[in-house]
Image (cartoon, rainbow, N blue to C red):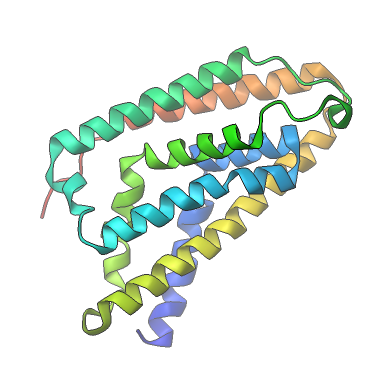
Amino acid sequence: MTLADYLLFLPACFALNMAFGPNNLLSLSNGARDGTVRAVAAASGRLVAFAIMIAVAGLGLGTLLTASELAFAVVKWLGAAYLIWLGIKLLRADAPAPDREAAGPSQPLGALIRQEFWVAAGNPKAILIFTAFFPQFVVPQDYAASFTLLGASFLVLEVVAITIYALIGARLGRYFRSARPFRWFNRISGGLMIGFGLLLAAARRPAGP
């Protein structure tokens, strides 16, 4: 891979990392509720899911989601149902106490990590990014090394995006001095999560070549 190609890949990839979706919404809401450090730590579940997807795509198995309508539909509907379920949980969640540090985190870190993992894993369009976007920059003569470089770069940029969203969420959280703003924040986040679930449910399998 030439340096020029790699420098073209980086900003295009970071735009994908920064796109506002269900995982970045989780980092935003986790940052507002539990702070930057816990939000970033929770997003390790997302990184694991993406690393698995990158490995699957690198082995060529990711094309199954493009080729198989059944496989795409199963992942899509499971992912959509999970997003809608999370959205309903947010809508029904109690607002944290004004003194959040004294009250402690609302969920164990392990639960937040699992949420991030399953939200990422339940979106079939995520693995299609790796099967459709990465090959444009892969060097066929050095496939393994170039795909690994692209995958590692994606994960590093994902950490940057996670941190940015978590910081924004934490900054918003500092302005919530009472339970009422948190309650509205949960309602907005829950509504957006349900919206993402409905959009995923309506997604169609990409047409083959």
Relative to 15, is 178 on the left or the right? Answer: right
Identity of the residue drawn at 52% across and 39% down: 116
Q: Along the line of sight, which residue is nearer the eye, 49 or 191?
A: 49
Would you place residue 69 above or below residue 45 in this image?
above
Q: Quadrant of the C terminus?
A: bottom left
Relative to 70, is 102 on the left or the right? Answer: right
Asked if residue 198 shows in the view, the reply is no
* Quadrant in which residue 26 is drawn: top right
Would you place residue 170 above or below residue 56 in this image?
above
Residue 102 is situated, as x and y percent measured from the top left of the image, at 89, 28
* Quadrant in which residue 97 is drawn: top right
Identity of the residue drawn at 22% across and 32% down: 73
- In the picture as drawn, the residue positioned furthest to the bottom comes out as 2
Asked if residue 187 shows in the view, the reply is yes
Relative to 32, is 176 on the left or the right? Answer: right
Relative to 37, is 50 on the left or the right? Answer: left
Residue 136 is situated, as x and y percent measured from the top left of the image, at 28, 70
Q: Along the line of sight, which residue is nearer the eye, 94 or 133?
A: 94
Residue 43 is situated, as x and y percent measured from the top left of the image, at 57, 46
Residue 194 is situated, as x and y percent measured from the top left of the image, at 47, 23
